[in-house]
Amino acid sequence: MKNQRIIPVILSGGMGTRLWPLSRSNRPKQFLDLSGSGKTLIQDALARVSDRALFNAPILLCNEKHRFLVAEKTLENDIHDAKIILEPVARNTAPAIAAAALFALQTEENPLLLILPSDHIILNNAAFLNAVEKAVPLAATGRHVTFGITPDRAETGFGYIRKGAALDKEERCFAVESFVEKPDEATAQTYLDSGDYSWNSGMFLLSANVLLHELEKLEPAMLKHVQQAVEQSELDRDFTRLGHDAFAAAKDISIDYALMERTPNAAIIPVDCGWCDAGSWAALHQMAAKDANQNIVNGAAHLVDTEHCYITCDGGTQVTTLGVSNLAIISTKDCILVADLNRAQDVKGLVATLQKEQPKLVHEYRQEYRPWGHYDSIDKGSRHQVKRISVKPGQRLSLQMHYHRAEHWIVVRGTALVNRGEEQMMVTENQSIYIPCGTTHRIANPGKIPLDIIEVQSGSYLGEDDIVRFEDTYGRAANHQSQKEESTEESLDEITANSQKAA
């Protein structure tokens, strides 16, 4: 494997609606710590392919609104050469993987692509990497290798793959006989008993050239649109933006339907690696370590006569249970889900209903993440809103103003460097500053520790869209021209030095 060029392709386009309310569209499950590693799932995926003796720099594909989360988690894993490709619209896995293959061929003659979802859990990385090593000779000769998970139960929530003839003497690799949709319980039991079936993990190792050659025959129109989107792509700082119209015109289709179920070159390597697709609260309960009563508790909870429950407290609210069993209880800062674990797959339908009635609960989490840090809306009325804002060291918000609200900032930790109109000043702990309505302003953290402030907004309209940005480090300003702004905008170090001189 060391002599073969392998480029990891990490897909981060999913929304994770089955793990609502912890997972929201602005913070899907790949940005949550669900494996117990202390890292988010996307960081676990990056760590899985971090050995540069085996893997090249990764390619990541994500929704545009998650770009700063992806970039932040990549840097937190000390990866500085990843290619982050922004999908202008969701078009499923086949167009995304085709785009990754086209970009990979710009730097390598014929790389192998290791396709990994960003939101799966693998507890035994060594076993998985061993399976990748077995797959390399097959993929190098044009086989599209999928990694089938050895089933340990009659699971009805996964698709299955039936293995065919052995492709090696050791009977470690097999041709794919067929792909099977999610079965009923009786059928799933027959699959388990036969020993011929594996769960479909959605992970693949394949040749970029062979992939594109087959897609040209199987899905020529889709591939043509993706090629146009790649040709029309533009660099935006650390991101590559695919051409919007061309990618939007591409067929919405999975790699299973576009390629794997139709190609004669599909192969499977069964692997037992502690895999979980983190697809429901029941799935997480199934795989995690439990207490004596088969409960899993994350956060503050007090349980009495409670068994076989999955409980997560994200937001400080104490959960107390008495005489219950087989429940998922998920408490967040703005809502609580109580569901029968046997109906965990139905949460997606619940979210679809909420999408119509209370869309904010589906899309937004009370704690919102931004490239400079995060904020938590801790109180809101008709003419006021209170936020707790945290700015990371060395980061700053955009230079902006509001038409309908004034703001009062109180520093509770760290030191703030504030621009207010033509003024510039340092505001330290226990000090405050008032920003009148219509006044241009900016706050930055020049220090070495996080800057925490309490922001009190007052006015006739408090929506996030009442922000007029004039300059922004992160490319969000109106009529943004990144290179021009980069050359004319002062660095944070320069601003800090100038402020100290003035003082």
Image (cartoon, grey):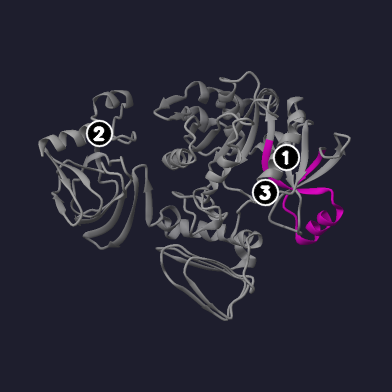
Q: Quadrant of the N terminus?
A: top right
Q: Determine the residue positioned at 55% across, 52% down.
A: 37
Question: Foreground residue, 255 or 275?
Answer: 275
Q: Quadrant of the C terminus?
A: top left
Q: CA distance from mark 2 to mark 1?
A: 47 Å
Is any part of residue 251 visible from this angle?
no
Q: Mark 3 Cα within 10 Å, few/some/many (few <14, many 20+)? A: few
Q: Determine the residue positioned at 70% across, 48% down.
A: 273
Query: In the structure shown, which secondary structural element does the residue marked by tag 1 occupy?
Result: helix
Is any part of residue 467 visible from this angle?
yes
Asked if the residue at tag 2 contacts the one at tag 3, i.e. Cβ–Cβ closer than 8 Å, the answer is no
Residue 63 locus on image (x, y percent): 48, 39
Which quadrant of the figure has residue 161?
A: top right
Which residue range is magenta in the image? Answer: 175-204
Residue 206 included in the magenta stretch of the image: no
Residue 175 locus on image (x, y percent): 82, 36
Horizontally, residue 244 falls left or right of residue 214, namely: left
Q: Mark 2 Cα within 10 Å, few/some/many (few <14, many 20+)? A: few
Q: Determine the residue positioned at 24% across, 62% down.
A: 382
User: Which amino acid, by three-letter code, is at mark 2?
Assistant: Asp
Q: CA distance from mark 1 to mark 3?
A: 10 Å
Horizontally, residue 62 falls left or right of residue 466, namely: right
Residue holding disc 2 = 493
Residue holding disc 1 = 130
Above or below residue 114? Residue 431 is below
User: Which amino acid, by three-letter code, is at mark 3?
Assistant: Asn
User: Which amino acid, by three-letter code, is at mark 1?
Assistant: Asn
Q: Determine the residue positioned at 81% across, 45% down.
A: 162
Q: CA distance from mark 3 to mark 2?
A: 44 Å
Residue 124 numbered tag: 3
Residue farthest top in this picture: 109
